[in-house]
Amino acid sequence: MLSDRIKTIRSALLKHLEIADLGHSSGSLKSWFDSDFGAYIGACEERIIRAEYAQLPGYRLLSLGVTGDLQACNHFAQLHRFSLHPSDADGQHAALANYHQLPIPSGVVDVALMQHGLEFSASPKAALAEVCRVIMPGGHLVLCVFNPFGIHGGIKWLMQLLTNRPQYRFHNLRANRLADWLSLLSFQVLDVHYGAFSPIANSAPKQSELAPWQSLCERANLPFGNVYIMHAVKRETQGIGRRSTRWPKPAHGYGHRRVQSEQQRGSAPNRQHKFDEDSNATS
């Protein structure tokens, strides 16, 4: 009886902590990102993207955001910029699609920007594998993720138990863990930038309006910001270079035995021919 009660409580707790599909939670998340603290997070990310990744090479840019806001992708230099989103919240996206099943061929995107669409997805691994699939070899991936060691990520577990607010229902993805996932998908992480160190914000500040300690934290790139931005590039598994098409000769095995048998078959008629010549000579 007690064990059944414990199982019921455990299942209810897991259901309460379950991450909803992004198509259902994007509307509520958009309202939070429009708030003061959400605007502060977005402004810090846009400042880092504009300073570090605005000049990435390529023609096509794919944006996969959590709210569908296209402000960040407008800082890139790609001529063809388009976005996909799980819900038709604003009606300004190229198509509606789940992030774990993108309607795009493999290897056609030069730059992909995923702004918090990874940790708020029901399956981050599936979403990451899908966005990595559509990036061409040598293409770039820029990920904006909430930092588990930041203030917002640190209070997430407590706020999940006490409230039903959607901004606290996301997967905790450490930078090292995400780098391991990317290495399995043939991606090399080039750099990680941390930002948004303030615990509260009343507006979206500019670089000149940041507090001195925030500017110092950004210059030192301390791993305690509310968000981190990871930049990775897709590498070919084989690499570039000439491969020898010559098959090595096995020391032992089928090929070695076959060569010996062919030599034995070739020497048998010679021995028979020599025997016939010797017989004729004696006769």
Image (cartoon, grey):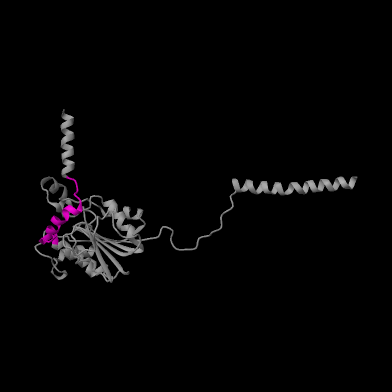
Q: Total marks drawn? A: 0
Between residues 46 and 16, which one lies in front from this camera angle? 16
Q: Is residue 170 above or below residue 111?
A: above
**What secondary structure predominates along the stretch shown in magenta?**
helix
State whether residue 86 appears in this view.
yes
Judge whether residue 45 is colored magenta. Answer: no
* Residue drawn at 31 percent across, 69 percent down: 59
Give residue 257's position: percent from left, percent from top: 63, 45
* Residue drawn at 40 percent across, 60 percent down: 236
Between residues 251 and 30, which one lies in front from this camera angle? 30
What is the residue that sits farthest to the top in this orientation? Answer: 1
State whether residue 179 appears in this view.
no
Judge whether residue 18 is colored magenta. Answer: yes
The picture quadrant where one finds residue 161 is top left
Give residue 9's position: percent from left, percent from top: 15, 36
Provide the residue span drawn in magenta: 17-38
What is the residue that sits farthest to the right in this orientation? Answer: 283
Give residue 129's position: percent from left, percent from top: 31, 54
Give residue 215's position: percent from left, percent from top: 18, 66
In the rendered view of the protein, which quadrant contains the N terminus?
Answer: top left
In the rendered view of the protein, which quadrant contains the C terminus?
Answer: top right
* Residue drawn at 67 percent across, 48 percent down: 262
Q: Is residue 35 rendered to the left or right of residue 224? A: left
